[in-house]
């Protein structure tokens, strides 16, 4: 993920990486490994039927940055309700899906992918 717009050229620094399709991959701290019979590699996530937020952190080790580049592959299992309790504050934000933020007190939103079983959720 180097270069302008992740095009493979110079200018980018990798801060976090995990790929569960690799044979020696492990879930980052905070996430639990899950195995499914219909997927040929383990996944990382939270406990089933849990309404709690699960997080992991990747440190930039003090490097300043003004752009973020990356990709996420998500899988849905059990029920998904998109934005839980319809929170509108990033510090209390819970989503069935993936949310990427940076900083702390307050966190700043970068990107969210929400999943739902229902149309118009």
Image (cartoon, rainbow, N blue to C red):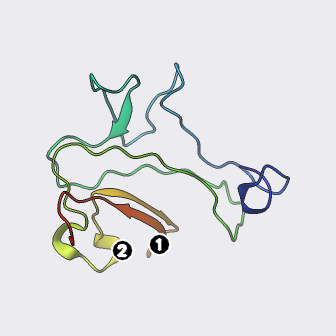
Is residue 59 shown left or right of residue 114? right
Identify the residue at image location x=37%, y=33%.
43
Residue under circle 1?
A: 109
Residue that protrudes farthest toward the top in the picture: 23
The quarter of the displayed image where residue 18 is located: top right
Looking at the image, is mark 1 or mark 2 earlier in the sequence?
Answer: 2
Is residue 85 or residue 108 the one in the foreground?
85
Residue that protrudes farthest toward the bottom in the picture: 88
**Please, is residue 44 above or below residue 118 in the view?**
above
Secondary structure type for disc 1: strand
**Please, is residue 14 above or below residue 64 in the view?**
above
Residue under circle 2?
A: 90
**Please, is residue 19 above or below residue 41 in the view?**
below
The quarter of the displayed image where residue 11 is located: bottom right
Identify the residue at image location x=79%, y=49%.
8
Relative image position of residue 46 (x, y in whole percent)? 27, 43
Relative image position of residue 65 (x, y in whole percent)? 70, 67
The quarter of the displayed image where residue 29 is located: top left
């Amino acid at each position: 993920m180097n270069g302008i717009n992740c095009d493979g050229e110079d200018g980018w620094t990798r801060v976090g990486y995990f790929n569960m399709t690799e044979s020696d991959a492990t879930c980052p701290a905070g996430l639990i490994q899950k195995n499914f019979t219909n997927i040929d590699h383990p996944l990382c996530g939270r406990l089933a039927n849990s309404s709690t937020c699960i997080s992991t952190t990747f440190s930039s080790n003090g490097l300043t940055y003004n752009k973020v580049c990356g990709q996420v592959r998500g899988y849905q299992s059990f029920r998904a309700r998109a934005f839980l309790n319809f929170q509108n504050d990033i510090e209390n934000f819970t989503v069935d899906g993936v949310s990427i933020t940076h900083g702390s007190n307050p966190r700043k939103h970068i990107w969210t992918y929400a999943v739902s079983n229902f149309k118009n959720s």
